[in-house]
Image (cartoon, helix red, strand yellow):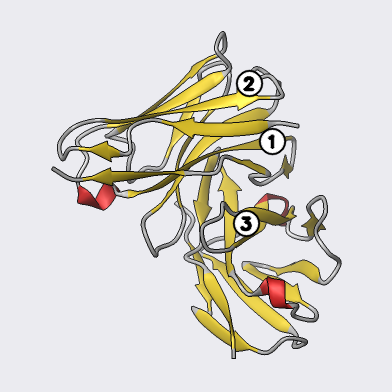
Amino acid sequence: QLQLQESGPGLVKPSETLSLTCNVSGGSISTNSYYWGWIRQPPGKGLEWIGSIYYSGSTYYNPSLKSRVTISVDTSKNQFSLHLSSVTAADTAVYYCARDQTAYEFWSGYYSWGQGTLVTVSS
Amino acid sequence: EIVLTQSPGTLSMSPGERVTLSCRASEIVSSNYLAWYQQKPGQAPRLLIYGGSNRATGIPGRFSGSESGTDFTLTISRLEPEDFAVYYCQQYHNSRRTFGQGTKVEIK
């Protein structure tokens, strides 16, 4: 059974870069048609899609965050990462990694999720 | 960018009642690319419905999804105590995904 686990600092200073890693176990990150995504949720608020990556390295970002976001994949370690630069208090959120699957006229929705990790932006 | 608008923001319901949640897209979205999630406090979201009307693995039959043009609906036929939660819709278009803002179903 596929499992995803986020890891990274729980506290980041304003203007610095937030970096998180999602470790994938129980399956290969290099599986065809699987996409690996990051989603965040500020305290008490809704879900926001940050972006997704395919094992080939193709990336897709939320236009509202695109200038600050980089998602990368390391197939040798079966993990993918999120880097969000120039953070402010508004970036304080629970960050989730997740997996979905696409094919011709098919999208699975995010059916595998990590447990989430709270990142607080504060000096 | 496609915007999903969910309504109402909060629903106060009693166990056993039928619940209908709405998700309206700002432009045409194929039902193939619409999903619904349930989220309880302190937990990651759980996929309920994908492809507009397909129940995910292990999801009870009381959950159903439907579509009419740009309007999508999640129906819970008979509310169980464990169904009180926040529900989100999400769409996939041109390799990008967006969520609605959520509807909270609370106990009356």
Picture coordinates of residue A19 (x, y %)?
A: 34, 29
Determine if residue B30 is in view: no
Residue A29, disc: 2
Cα–Cα gap, marks 2 and 3: 28 Å
Q: Classify mark 2: helix, strand or loop.
A: loop
Amino acid type of the residue tagged 2 in the rendering: Ile
Picture coordinates of residue B22 (x, y %)?
A: 61, 75
Q: Classify mark 1: helix, strand or loop.
A: strand
**Front: mark 2 or 1:** 2
Q: Tell me which label, 2 or 1, sits earlier in the chain.
A: 2
Q: Please name the residue shown 56% across and 51% down the image.
A: B44
Cα–Cα gap, marks 2 and 1: 14 Å
Q: Classify mark 3: helix, strand or loop.
A: loop
Marks 3 and 1 share the same chain: no
Sort mark 1 into few (<14), some (14-19) or many (20+) by Cα contacts within 10 Å.
Answer: some
Amino acid type of the residue tagged 3 in the rendering: Val
Residue furthest top as drawn: A76
**Front: mark 2 or 3:** 2
Q: Chain of mark 2?
A: A
Looking at the rendering, which quadrant does residue B37 occupy? bottom right
Q: Is residue A47 above or below residue B101?
A: above
For the residues bearing labels 3 and 1, Cβ distance under 8 angstroms? no
Front residue of this view, candidates A83 and A20: A20
Looking at the rendering, which quadrant does residue A5 occupy? top right
Cα–Cα gap, marks 3 and 1: 15 Å
Which residue lies under the disc numbered 1? A102
Picture coordinates of residue B58 (x, y %)?
A: 82, 54
Which residue lies under the disc numbered 3? B29
Sort mark 2 into few (<14), some (14-19) or many (20+) by Cα contacts within 10 Å.
Answer: many
Picture coordinates of residue A65 (x, y %)?
A: 32, 41
